[in-house]
Image (spheres, rainbow, N blue to C red):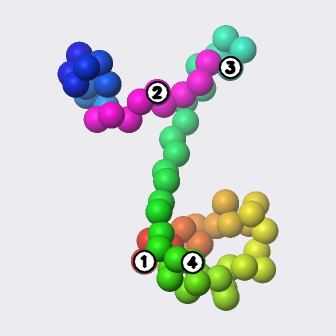
Amino acid sequence: MLFGGWGGDVGFAGVRGLNIQGTFVKFTAIGVYVEAAAVDALRPKWAPKSVDDLETSEEFFKDIID
């Protein structure tokens, strides 16, 4: 193990799943940090949308990273 047992080849990614009722479920999550100015710039277009709409919107994700 490299770096005190922190995953070695997975680059500090940690556990990538959960054991739920005896079944290991793999998942991936991406965290993005943005400055307040970016939030202000996104607000006019995206504020009327629901959280569910934003979570599934490829266009919203592209607006954040572009």
Looking at the image, is mark 4 or mark 2 nearer the viewer?
Answer: 4
Q: Which mark is residue 39?
A: 4
Bounds of the magenta segment: 11-19
- N-terminal of the two: label 1 or label 4? 4
- State the residue position of label 1: 66
- State the residue position of label 2: 15
- N-terminal of the two: label 4 or label 3? 3
Whole-number angstrom distance, CA of label 2 to CA of label 3: 14 Å
* Residue 23 point in image, percent of width and height: 64, 16
* Residue 46 point in image, percent of width and height: 68, 79
Whole-number angstrom distance, CA of label 1 to CA of label 4: 13 Å
Mark 2 crowdedness (10 Å alpha carbons): few <14, some 14-19, many ≥20:
few
Q: Main secondary structure of the magenta part?
A: loop
Given the image, on which type of amino acid does mark 1 rest? Asp
Q: Secondary structure at mark 4?
A: helix
Magenta stretch holds residue 1: no
Given the image, on which type of amino acid does mark 3 rest? Ile
Task: Identify the residue shown where x is 59% and y is 72%.
Answer: 60
Q: Which mark is residue 20?
A: 3
Whole-number angstrom distance, CA of label 4 to CA of label 3: 35 Å
Mark 3 crowdedness (10 Å alpha carbons): few <14, some 14-19, many ≥20:
few
